[in-house]
Amino acid sequence: MDKFYTTTAIDYVNGAPHIGHAYEKILTNVIYRHFTQRVSDPYMLTGVDEHGIKIQKLAQSMGIEPKELCDTNAQKFADAWKRLDINYSQLIRTTSEEHKKTVQKIFKKLIEQGDIYKNSYKGLYCAGCEAFLSDKDLDEEGCCLIHKKKPEEVSEENYFFKLTKYKQRIIDHIKQNPDFIVPSFRANEVLNQLENIEDISVSRAKTNVSWGIDVLDDPEQVIYVWIDALSNYITALGYDTENPSEKFKKYWPAEVQVIGKDILKFHSIYWLALLMALDIELPKHLLAHGWITIDEAKMSKSLGNVVSPDSVMDSFNLEEPDALRYYMATAAPCGKDGNYSDDDFKEKVNAHLANSMGNLLNRTLSMLVKYFDGEIKPEFVQKSPLFDDAIQAIKEVKHHFDYFEVSEAAQKIVELVDKTNKYVTDNAPWTLAKEEKMTECGVVLYTVLEIMCVISSLIYPYCPNIATKMASQLKYDINTKLDDIKIENIKTGKLISKEEIVPVFLRLDSELADKSKKK
Ligand code: MSP
């Protein structure tokens, strides 16, 4: 495998990014960065979803044009991802001319081949979901189960997509590819939803929704958000109904498309049907992650508990995002819900990144300077059983990433750190030095430093800044591909001087955390 294409959902720009949006982008970026260590040509797409009634109404209420609102808020997403060191390859905006043009062509093609037809429609539309709801989506009071609001009664002429035509193929695909939906327990949910699917409305009358992409040759109709939004994954690569770009041919199909569990239905049913209609290969996997709650409560504007990645970074005075990346990426087992709390954040990153990992490197390098003036002597270079543990850890981490188990992979790294700490405690190099068993002491330090090279590579996708600082003190090339790691990275001779030793991660200050709680 030499290419790896991964995507995130594209976020609605009706506000600033919160920690739930950040969770998904971090998760995807950790996967992407891991695969930069394995393939030559990885590509990560993220983006913003800018059309629809929600944006239109919000802009109206603010007395501005929708495009102005989109420009302002799209920038907030781009800024947030930059601050979190999410080094995506591309951020697509659905208001871009290229995207709009391709979506129009896709729509036209589907009308021409009979997959899209016009019909009059009466239904209940939820602006929160940007979707028509059926009885199953409503509570006893007739409110949307997710948004708790009464949907709007809509009666219009709409274009419809023949979803039912693809029902059986989708069912077969999901059944024949049990690893298509990750985690696999969600596949049953989708199969149940497929039981009752109907053709779906894919346009809105312009009199009701004007902020969207016009249907070509039918100026009264606007393409309704999901066809517009879902197409981003291919329009970004330069897909074209007649003449797909080289970039599209190179990267598509995606290895993994990362989305929240709330939009799995749109991706595992609508998206597959759309690709089938266009005769395009299907993505290899859909990773449906769980939701992030705040102090165990659902995040919502009305509860006033929306946490932004900026507010966490600011309240803890973080110059680098590694701690937040690590915390979010390990917030939940694959596909399950997770939680953010200030106390837990502080505790976990202090324990894992400062006390266990950072201190281990710092103490070892300090001892090397104290006892050997920073020098690795040839007699220190000896094989250790711990090397086998490190090789095993690389294998296990890769294995978890093959299944997009980001948090589980991190657990393997923590285990390797713990084992190495235990090795230091058991062998007590300070006692060996006191007893003047200098070679034995040197062997212990050398062994730990070799393992730290592996740890820096493994932690890199989560904590790129910390990993780079570790590697630079070890004179190790952080760009080493995982398959090329040999446990012979530490060279004999002078490795480091006292002045070069820097802590890779400073403990989070408890006062700062308490302050952020009171905010
Ligand atoms: N625009 C659509 C997606 C279109 S993809 C072709 C959308 N946007 S959204 O802004 O509402 O959500 C974007 C992503 O953020 C979704 O995958 C959603 O699941 C995720 N999250 C939004 N809130 C979240 C949490 N509280 N926790 C984790 N992820 C959540 O849906």
Image: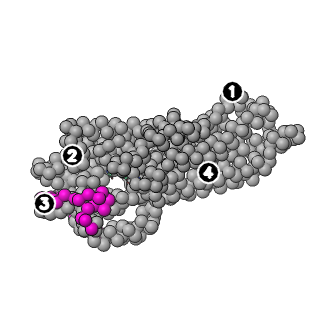
Where residue 273 appears, as percent x and y from the top left, is 29, 62
- The one nearer the camera, 23 or 240, is 23
Residue tagged by mark 3? 155
- Judged left or right of residue 172, residue 197 is left
Residue 458 highlighted magenta (yes or no): no
Of badges 3 and 2, the one in the foreground is: 2
Q: Amino acid at mark 2?
A: Lys
User: Pointers 4 and 3 in contact (CB under 8 A)?
Assistant: no
Residue drawn at point x = 56 percent, y = 44 percent:
346
Which residue range is magenta in the image?
140-167
Could you say which quadrant of the image residue 196 lies in? bottom left
Could you say which quadrant of the image residue 136 lies in? bottom left
- Judged left or right of residue 70, residue 23 is right
Could you say which quadrant of the image residue 287 lies in? bottom left
Mark 1: which secondary structure? helix
- Judged left or right of residue 21, residue 455 is right
Mark 4 or mark 2, which has the lower sequence index? Answer: 2
